[in-house]
Image (cartoon, helix red, strand yellow):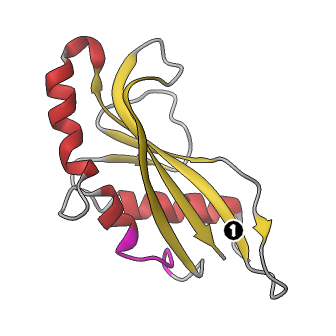
Amino acid sequence: MAELAEVRDGLKTRLATITGLRAHDVWPDQVNTPAAMVRPISDPIQETLSGIQSWRFEIVLIGYPAQQGMARGQETLDGYLAASGSQSVAAALRGDRTLGGIVSTLDVAGWRDYGVLDIGTNIEYLGVVFDVQVWS
């Protein structure tokens, strides 16, 4: 069974395939945009008698500091929100649903919370949160 750090790292590796996106498997001390951070949001749940576990993660994507321009921030996020294409977060994650063979599969359930995000750095960012489920 995959361990938490392995799954986080696998998600980061997939996000790093997006040119120009700074991908993090742990919350960085300093954030340079655009950036995506992997955040586990639930303890793995055993779903079947065969021992398959289900993990839930958030990918917190921040596009641009809000105080530097909302319009530019929205334009920065557009490609990441697309269903396909070289900037698409969903396409990058679905490009290897096994994260290099460490899990059985994953799914991007969608995105939410589009708008100004406070990530605890005293700077507000325009961003969005992606919901990802991983089975191992």
x, y (%) of residue 88? Answer: 26, 57
Q: Residue at x 47, y 11 (%)?
A: 122
Residue 5 vs residue 78: left or right?
A: right
x, y (%) of residue 103? Answer: 60, 77
x, y (%) of residue 50? Answer: 80, 88
Q: Quadrant of residue 117?
A: top left
Residue 96 part of the magenta-drawn span: yes
Binning the other alpha carbons within 10 Å of mark 1 as few (below 14), some (14 to 19) or many (20 upward) gives many
Residue 44 vs residue 7: left or right?
A: right
Outermost residue to the bottom:
50
Outermost residue to the right:
49
Q: Residue at x 20, y 31 (%)?
A: 74
Q: Residue at x 52, y 28 (%)?
A: 29
Q: Secondary structure at mark 1?
A: strand
Going by the numbered disc 1, the residue's amino acid type is Ser
Residue 81 vs residue 54: left or right?
A: left
Q: Quadrant of residue 49?
A: bottom right
Query: Which residue corresponds to mark 1?
Result: 54
